[in-house]
Image (spheres, helix red, strand yellow):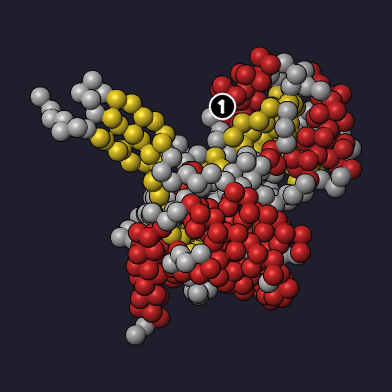
Amino acid sequence: MTDTQDIKTLMARLGADAKAAAGELASASAERKHAALISAADNVWNARAHIISENAKDLAYGKEKGLSDAMMDRLMLDEDRIQSIVDGLRNIAEQADPVGEVIAEWTQPTGLNIKRVRTPLGVIGVIYESRPNVTADAGALCLKAGNAVILRGGSEGFNSSRAIHACLVQGLKDANLPEASIQLVPTRDRAAVQEMLTMTNTIDVIVPRGGKGLVGLVQKEARVPVFAHLEGIVHIYVDQHADPAKVLNVVLNAKTRRTGICGAAECLLIHEAVADTIGQGIVKALVDAGVEVRAGANLAKIAGTVPADETDWGTEYLDMIIAAKTVGSVDEAIAHIRQYGSNHTDCVLTEDQNVADRFMQRLDSAILMHNASTQFADGGEFGMGAEIGIATGKMHARGPVGAAQLTSFKYLVVGDGTTRA
């Protein structure tokens, strides 16, 4: 048997086991799913020393591969980050169970009572890079929504993901749910990814979470439906009626809190009327904070900036770099974002409600913010417990994908011997 045949056989088995597990999960009680997640959280915390030890192997592997500082930051686990994983599992456990929720109900003149209710999608395939915490977030969210999941983590996080996955499986065992409800592909071989993308008989949707290369590959080659965003080219527009203190706090947080996440600000648009006041202040503050500001013509005179070129507009840096330019109006800002943005997250800073309304009405990003840091572009911050990713497409799920977004719906139609004329 060739290696390719080995992978095909492995993935076919994972797919069949996941489909069988999904059949049981669809009718699993909210109490059993809750118990599995609480047990998983306890297991992760109890195993934290082992998880950190396994993560050290991954960090050494990542360093050897020459991963960027941003990627290494995503990969790293310490006790605080493991506490965040535990908190995420507990938060998801305490969320309302979406399965069976009545979305709408009405009665027709014929006497038929019709309900539209949430139902699991079935089997979800999650393909991700670097972040081992996705193993817990994705596994938990899929379980909460009654779905089985096949997780394929990045090769750099292989050991960390296995250690976390073992805790999730123990939670399933403790709650008497099928162990195949949450499966982790047990190989670094990239052929497993290619195989997942064509498993139309067993996988209902694929969620890629990672860089542009991974997401682009999945969107291009998948035969299974995909929830995804290609890039997080996040803009902040500073209006002439912005509050200087809010601008300083929000922009610095949006750029520097964590540069490697998809909600980090990548381009700053400043109304030309405040370029020499608020604009100069925030650009200097960014430079002082260690950010490389690639400035358009009107801002390039500010000390510490470097001149921007055309390639800087529409770039996702995921680093301590931001592009900045002036615009003449909110409409010019909107036009720039439409041309260079990625429909992920965009923000307006202004005290003029009319400007804020225009910005939010005329842009179609999955997340639009007013006077708030774009680092809030996160399912956990939206009250979803966690997210499996952020979708920028327009079909089904959009924005942070939490448990409710990992469901479809069906119609329950009840009559009383009712016939159609």
Q: Could you tell me which quadrant the N terminus lies in? A: bottom left
Q: Name the residue nearer the viewer: 202 or 329.
A: 202
Relative to 417, 53 lies left or right: right
- Badge 1 crowding class, 10 Å Cα cut-off, few under 14, some 14 to 19, many 20 or more, is some
- Could you tell me if residue 221 is visible in this image? no
Q: Which residue is mark 1?
A: 363
Q: Position of residue 339 (x, y in %)?
A: 57, 32
Find residue 417 and report its image quarter: top left
The three-letter amino acid code for the residue at tag 1 is Leu
Q: Position of residue 355 (x, y in %)?
A: 67, 17
- Could you tell me if residue 116 is visible in this image? yes
Q: Position of residue 349 (x, y in %)?
A: 73, 26
Relative to 264, 217 lies left or right: left
Q: Give above or below for 336 relative to 76.
A: above
Residue at (56, 30) in percent of width and height:
338
Q: Name the residue nearer the viewer: 219 or 173.
A: 173
Residue at (62, 19) in percent of width and height:
357
Secondary structure of the residue carrying numbered label 1: loop
Find residue 21 and report its image quarter: bottom left
Find residue 421 and report its image quarter: top left
Count the marks.
1
Q: Position of residue 37 (x, y in %)?
A: 57, 59
| Residue lying farthest to the bottom in this orientation | 1
| Residue lying farthest to the front in this orientation | 416
Residue at (59, 49) in percent of width and height:
94
Residue at (30, 60) in percent of width and height:
201
